[in-house]
């Protein structure tokens, strides 16, 4: 699998996903093992079934397997003959579903590839964001991503995409257009574009592109200079992008920060830890507990990039890694949290590549906030609870440019907090109670 620019693979770090995602550690069946036996096992669906069973048996956080007789499950799985991989996949899914844990799940090769591509923070394509223009009903370029083939070729926001490699885009869904545009790095694609009434063809060579997951801007709010940062997900590039954002805004002498985690479903655990350390000099970040009850606490390490006041925005789609970061900042009194109750996922998964290119995600640990709070199925309660009306939610969803403006109730409440004399300040040498002892597995951190 492609290595990220950070030099760690999504399989080598703990990954905390949101409502449907997972979290990852280095597989006991490493990639070298997978390569060496893949050819031998490709025609042996039963071997994949047993490989999944062995991994779950070794790693699952609950030794009782949620009161399932896991040995009996193995006997049942291996007593059957599977005429195809699809039959084996169906049997694996059925066995895992009986455990009642939606985060322990099987992925076919396409699903596994999609997950690892998402967590790598990279795509192979030309680097554009598109939308279906409401007025023209045409696919329209919203943005050409930095350092992408599209930007280098001069593609501009507002360019209409008439055809992709000769296929007309009229009535084409954005997802279908994206599938046509993405492809192997180094291959050529031709777009038929229209700009200011003039149609022309543009040839582009696909490349591997770092997907922007951090966006930021300097806002002059009265006499206060506010750094507004949005973090969409915790990909392998998120920490580097966050570091650049904070450093750039520091250079512009911001007085305060607003960190927007609304809608962020989670991602890599290590990314959330690294980002927490950019805001905190001291204190606990997260505590994980494995199947043996062993506990491991991760702390800040005096590497904060800023001590300026901070407000964090969350909603009920802020999940998992977002909740780790939010919990750390809240419990250490480093930030004021504004918004709605968060999603409530406090489980860590490992993700393993299997011999035939499929994958399995397995819940391996439970995590707690610095104060020892279990947020699973509960979420984090913001310091300032502010639930938006359906109309407000719809307005921000259909007009994302309104986020971080005076038309955004969460942002305007953040400004009110920052303009007061009681805004959040870092607490020096903050000590958190975690009610845990012992040492846990490394979890690939």
Image: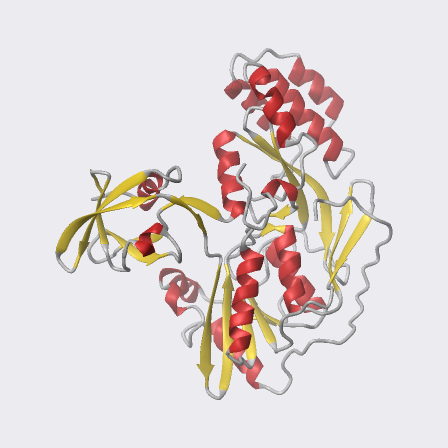
Q: Quadrant of residue 368?
A: bottom right
Locate residue 27, reporting x and y percent.
67, 35
* Residue drawn at 26 percent across, 54 percent down: 140
Above or below for 123 versus 68: below
Circle count: 0
Q: Is residue 348 visible?
A: yes
Locate residue 271, reporting x and y percent.
61, 55
Q: Quadrant of residue 405?
A: bottom left
Locate residue 128, reporting x and y percent.
34, 52
Above or below for 87 versus 383: above
Q: Is residue 95 visible?
A: no
What's the coloring here? secondary structure
Above or below for 307 versus 365: below
Between 355 and 423, the one lying in front of the other is 355
* Residue drawn at 55 percent across, 46 percent down: 4
Between 409 and 12, the one lying in front of the other is 12
* Residue drawn at 27 percent across, 59 percent down: 156
Locate residue 379, reporting x and y percent.
64, 57
* Residue drawn at 73 percent across, 20 percent down: 72
View extreme (left): residue: 197
View extreme (right): residue: 438
The N terminus lies in quadrant: top right
Q: Is residue 140 left or right of residue 264?
A: left
Q: Quadrant of residue 393?
A: bottom left
């Amino acid at each position: 699998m492609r290595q990220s620019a950070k030099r760690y693979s999504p399989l080598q770090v703990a990954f905390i996903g949101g409502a449907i995602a997972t979290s990852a550690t280095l597989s006991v069946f490493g990639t070298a093992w997978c390569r060496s036996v893949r050819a031998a096992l490709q025609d042996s669906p039963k071997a994949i079934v047993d490989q999944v069973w062995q991994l779950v048996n070794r790693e699952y956080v609950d030794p009782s397997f949620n009161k399932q007789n896991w040995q009996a499950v193995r006997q049942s799985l291996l007593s059957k003959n599977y005429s195809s991989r699809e039959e084996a996949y169906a049997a694996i899914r059925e066995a895992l579903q009986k455990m009642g844990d939606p985060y322990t799940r099987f992925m076919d090769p396409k699903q596994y590839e999609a997950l690892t591509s998402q967590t790598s923070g990279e795509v192979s394509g030309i680097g554009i964001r598109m939308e279906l223009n409401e007025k023209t009903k045409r696919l329209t370029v919203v943005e050409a991503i930095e350092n992408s083939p599209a930007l280098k070729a001069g593609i501009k926001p507002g360019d209409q995409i008439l055809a992709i490699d000769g296929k007309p885009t009229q009535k084409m869904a954005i997802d279908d257009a994206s599938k046509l545009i993405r492809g192997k790095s180094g291959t050529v694609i031709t777009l038929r574009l229209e700009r200011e009434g003039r149609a022309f063809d543009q040839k582009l060579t696909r490349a591997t592109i770092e997907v922007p997951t951090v966006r930021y801007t300097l806002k002059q709010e009265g006499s206060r200079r506010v750094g507004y940062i949005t973090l969409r997900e915790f990909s392998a590039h998120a920490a580097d992008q966050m570091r650049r954002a904070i450093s750039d805004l520091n250079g512009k002498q911001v007085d305060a920060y607003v960190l927007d985690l609304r809608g962020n479903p989670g991602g890599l655990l290590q990314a959330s830890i690294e980002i927490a350390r950019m805001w905190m000099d001291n204190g606990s970040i997260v505590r994980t507990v494995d199947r043996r009850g062993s506990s491991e606490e991760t702390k800040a390490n005096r590497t904060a990039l800023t001590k300026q006041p901070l407000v964090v925005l969350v909603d009920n789609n802020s999940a998992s890694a977002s909740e780790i970061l939010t919990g750390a900042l809240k419990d250490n009194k480093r930030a004021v949290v504004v918004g709605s109750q968060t999603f409530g996922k406090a489980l860590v998964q490992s993700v393993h590549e299997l011999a035939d290119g499929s994958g399995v995600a397995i819940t391996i640990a439970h995590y707690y906030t610095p104060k020892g709070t279990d947020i699973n199925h509960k979420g984090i309660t913001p310091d300032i609870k502010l639930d938006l009306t359906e109309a407000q939610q719809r307005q921000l969803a259909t007009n994302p440019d309104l986020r971080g403006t005076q038309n955004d109730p969460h942002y305007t409440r953040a400004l009110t907090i920052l303009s007061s004399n009681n805004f959040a300040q870092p607490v020096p040498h903050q000590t958190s109670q975690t009610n845990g002892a012992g040492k846990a597995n490394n979890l690939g951190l």
